[in-house]
């Protein structure tokens, strides 16, 4: 991709700017704290490839105590936030081993969220495509209609433990915002959700849901007015409110310990799915796949499969195509860089500034990706591929018409890969994380694609 014109960022202090946007050189120059852990293997040096046999005990070993997944992750923070994130990590490490916390979270998952969500065999769709068998982990049936509530209820419990009064977060598609507003109502906390103007218009039903649940929805009106800008605005607010509030990051991104915590809270998806799939079929799936925005639903499904002989595929949004600004395929095109307080693969210009991104799915258009995904890509345990807007929309309409399930456009990206796999291989089983339902998308889809006639006419 050819580099694009440099676009200045909105005016903030030097330290904050480093925190939000910094390239590595910038944060070093400004003496912003960064952890001193050694940088093993990948990157410029030779990468050690890992197979499923190397993944026993993986969750205990990664991330390390500095929040590193190999050379990615860490915490790039302004000084006043260093003790704040340390307190969050200490609190999490304390409560995640406590029997009381575990049993309370289990009760919430069962009685409030309606877990376990089922695994469903999409038989009609599978038959239409040939001999591959497509299965769906139905996170669309999780309370609030997406996987996001899995980490929000955990983050809410953590906030209560820390004595915080308010939850703060960003949202793209609105699913994390709705889930966090739900957790705030459940735990009796205040809630501020930051959302780009573009997404506020595109995902209007979720904005209404957040407001009904008692949250304040605060527009992010700078830059492209989408997910990255919502994260900028939420971090800025948090810098002034960290004593009373906790920033509940919506994916496996952000400074340590969030990538670890969000992954751990999401692991329930894969633990359930593995057991359910084996119970249904007597075997493990040949392939598991999930869409990757920040990467939380993918981490949730994938983690229990790393140590199994299963192919694992993450699906990035290729949007309108491969040109800069037309996609958000951060692993496919990104280079190592720092954004929003963590180091990962980042779509960036030659100065290290984040490039503009686009996807039809508001929850996927982020210029970086969770550090664990960057690591899993480098060591070769997860394959990352991409699908375009049009492929995702075809999958959206096929699942609706052939199975009676309207998926979130984000989840339709994973399904589009499963459909491609079925057409190309005509054998095997593929388990897709159906991360959310499509109610939030129907007005936008109907305005732009009608009832999907073009996808059925061309056959
Ligand atoms: C339904 C759904 N799936 C997937 C995503 C992408 O997020 P992540 O990659 O963290 O799972 C979102 C984000 O909003 C979403 O709403």
Image (tube, rainbow, N blue to C red):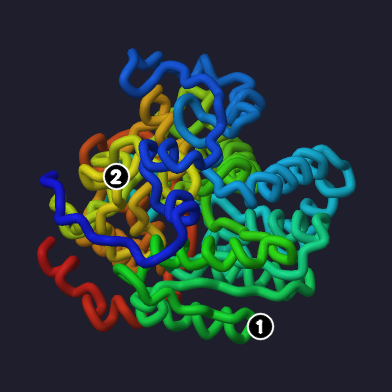
Instruction: Give the alpha-carbon distance from disc 1 to disc 2, as whole Å.
Output: 38 Å
Instruction: Answer whether labels 1 and 2 touch (C-beta < 8 Å).
Output: no
Return the x and y of residue 326 as percentages of the image width and height: 19, 58
Left/right placement of residue 370 relative to residue 453 reads right
117, 387: nearer the viewer: 387
Name the residue at 73% across, 62% down. 243
Instruction: Tell me which residue sits at (59%, 41%) in the image.
Output: 256
Q: Residue furthest right?
A: 100
x 40%, y 57%: residue: 411
Q: Secondary structure at mark 1?
A: loop
Residue highlighted by disc 2: 352
- How packed mark 1 is, by other alpha carbons closer than 10 Å (few <14, some 14-19, many 20 or more), is some
Answer with the quarter of the image where residue 45 lies.
top left
Front residue of 205/354: it is 354
- 43 shown above or below 273: above
Say if residue 272 shows up in the picture: no
The disc placed on residue 181 is none
At mark 2, the secondary structure is loop
Q: Which is more N-terminal, label 2 or label 1?
A: 1
Quadrant (top left, top right, bottom left, bottom right) of the C terminus: bottom left
x and y percent of residue 231 in the render?
A: 47, 61
Image point 62% across, 59% down: which residue? 248
Observer able to see residue 25: yes
Disc number placed over residue 214 in the picture, else none: 1
Q: Nearer the viewer, residue 233 or 422?
A: 233
């Amino acid at each position: 991709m050819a580099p694009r014109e440099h676009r200045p960022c909105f005016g903030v202090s030097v330290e904050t700017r480093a925190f939000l946007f910094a390239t590595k050189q910038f944060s070093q120059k400004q003496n912003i704290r960064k952890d001193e852990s050694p940088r093993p293997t990948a990157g410029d040096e030779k990468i050690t490839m890992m197979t499923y046999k190397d993944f026993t005990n993986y969750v205990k070993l990664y991330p390390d105590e500095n929040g590193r997944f190999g050379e990615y992750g860490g915490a790039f923070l302004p000084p006043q936030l260093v003790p704040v994130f340390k307190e969050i990590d200490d609190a999490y490490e304390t409560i995640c081993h406590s029997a009381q916390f575990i049993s309370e979270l289990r009760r919430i998952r069962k009685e409030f969220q309606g877990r376990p969500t089922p695994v469903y065999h999409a038989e009609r769709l599978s038959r239409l495509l040939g001999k591959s068998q497509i299965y769906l982990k139905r996170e669309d049936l999780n309370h609030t209609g997406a996987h996001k509530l899995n980490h929000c209820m955990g983050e809410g419990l953590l906030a209560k433990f820390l004595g915080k009064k308010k939850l703060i977060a960003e949202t793209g598609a609105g699913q994390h915002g709705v889930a966090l507003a739900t957790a705030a109502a459940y735990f009796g906390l205040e809630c501020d959700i930051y959302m780009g103007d573009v997404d506020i218009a595109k995902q209007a039903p979720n904005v209404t849901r957040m407001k009904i649940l008692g949250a304040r929805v605060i527009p992010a009106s700078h830059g492209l007015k989408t997910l990255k800008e919502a994260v900028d605005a939420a971090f800025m607010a948090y810098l002034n409110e960290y004593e009373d509030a906790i920033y509940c990051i919506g994916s496996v991104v952000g400074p340590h310990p969030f990538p670890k915590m969000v992954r751990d809270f999401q692991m329930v998806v894969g633990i359930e799915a593995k057991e359910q799939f084996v119970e249904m079929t007597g075997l493990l799936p040949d392939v598991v796949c999930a869409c990757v925005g920040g990467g939380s639903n993918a981490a949730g499904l994938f983690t229990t499969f790393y140590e199994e002989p299963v192919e694992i595929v993450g699906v990035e949004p290729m949007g309108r195509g491969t040109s800069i600004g037309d996609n958000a395929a951060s692993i496919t095109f990104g280079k190592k860089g720092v954004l929003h307080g963590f180091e990962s693969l980042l779509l960036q210009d030659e100065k290290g500034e984040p490039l503009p991104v686009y996807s039809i799915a508001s929850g996927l258009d982020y210029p970086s990706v969770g550090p664990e995904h960057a690591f899993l890509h480098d060591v070769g345990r997860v394959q990352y591929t991409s699908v375009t807007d049009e492929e995702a929309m075809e999958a959206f309409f096929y699942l609706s018409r052939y199975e009676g399930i309207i998926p979130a456009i984000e989840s339709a990206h994973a399904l589009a890969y499963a459909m491609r796999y079925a057409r190309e291989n005509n054998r095997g089983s593929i388990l897709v994380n159906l991360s959310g339902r499509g109610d939030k998308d129907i007005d936008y889809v109907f305005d732009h694609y009608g009832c999907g006639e073009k996808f059925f006419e061309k056959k």
